[in-house]
């Protein structure tokens, strides 16, 4: 018959053995708890990493304040400048006048300042643009992107036809001002439309900012039409006057 011994009846060896067993069991429990805690922490870390990754993706593809749909930075703005005979000032004023009066959609190469700057320039469809897409394909895609959003917001079915011209601003990305032709019905006439998109270097995709039937360009003052610069005009007038005076002198000298 088995006999149950009290602590007082146990030998030192038996007490030592029991303590080792108890400590081993407690250690196993602690290790198990630590593993479970570690697993939970690891799982939380994974979840946090996934959340951070999703937030990062959203940040990379989120629309910024200057990319809100329908936002036109040229709304309620006019460019006024004082006349200047200085070629540099005149060149810059002429460029800004065309830029503002066309809301960015018509900037001809002859009025772009010669000096280096990060402003709007006419887009050359024939130049190499990206390794996997031509300039014309890119602008077609930008016009279609904006038109798709326009149709969605207005519940219309305007159909893209072809791009007429494009103006770009290459600074922290590609801001495109695209003028294109579209049809509002299958048998309808071609109508000029405007689309504005922006694709910043840190974003995954381009964002459509606006699309609309083309607005009429505000009149350009005569002094800012594509004519020679003021000093060139003065030189031409001076040359003409000198030639006339010389002709008169020869006639009277006969």
Image (tube, rainbow, N blue to C red):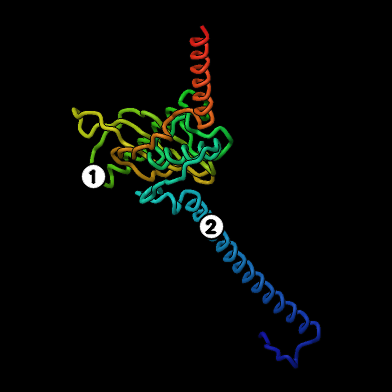
**Residue that mark 1 sits on:** 155
Q: Residues within 10 Å of mark 1 (few under 14, many from 20)?
A: few
Residue 94's place in the image compared with 26, above or below, is above
- Residue at 51% across, 18% down: 245
Q: Residue 230 location, x and y as percent?
A: 50, 32
Residue 140's image quarter? Answer: top left
Position of the N terminus by quadrant? bottom right
Q: Is residue 244 left or right of residue 209?
A: right
Please state which of residues 249 and 93 is positioned toward the viewer in this rendering. Answer: 249
* Secondary structure category for the residue under label 2: helix
Q: Is residue 111 left or right of residue 140?
A: right
- Which of the two discs, 1 and 2, sits closer to the camera? 1
- Residue at 73% across, 91% down: 7
- Residue at 81% across, 86% down: 12
What is the number of callouts on the image? 2
Please state which of residues 197 and 5 is positioned toward the viewer in this rendering. Answer: 197
Q: Residue 171 location, x and y as percent?
A: 53, 42
**Residue that mark 2 sits on:** 52
Residue 132 in sight in this render: no
Q: Is residue 200 left or right of residue 79?
A: right
């Amino acid at each position: 018959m088995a006999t149950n011994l009290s602590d007082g009846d146990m030998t030192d060896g038996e007490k030592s053995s029991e303590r080792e067993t108890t400590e081993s069991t407690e250690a196993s429990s602690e290790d198990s708890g630590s593993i479970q805690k570690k697993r939970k922490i690891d799982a939380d870390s994974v979840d946090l990493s996934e959340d951070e990754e999703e937030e990062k993706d959203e940040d990379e593809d989120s629309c910024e304040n200057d990319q809100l749909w329908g936002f036109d930075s040229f709304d309620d703005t006019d460019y006024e400048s004082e006349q200047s005979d200085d070629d540099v000032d005149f060149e810059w004023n002429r460029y800004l006048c065309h830029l503002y009066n066309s809301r960015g959609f018509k900037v001809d190469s002859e009025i772009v300042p010669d000096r280096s700057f990060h402003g709007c320039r006419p887009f050359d469809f024939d130049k190499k643009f990206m390794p996997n897409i031509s300039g014309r394909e890119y602008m077609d895609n930008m016009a279609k992107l904006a038109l798709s959003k326009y149709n969605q917001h207005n519940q219309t079915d305007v159909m893209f036809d072809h791009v007429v011209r494009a103006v770009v601003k290459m600074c922290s990305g590609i801001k495109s001002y695209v003028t294109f032709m579209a049809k509002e019905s299958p048998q309808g006439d071609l109508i000029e439309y405007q689309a504005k998109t922006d694709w910043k270097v840190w974003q995954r995709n381009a964002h459509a900012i606006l699309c609309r039937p083309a607005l009429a360009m505000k009149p350009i003052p005569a002094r800012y039409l594509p004519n020679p610069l003021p000093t060139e005009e003065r030189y031409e007038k001076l040359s003409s006057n000198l030639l006339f005076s010389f002709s008169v002198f020869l006639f009277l000298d006969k």
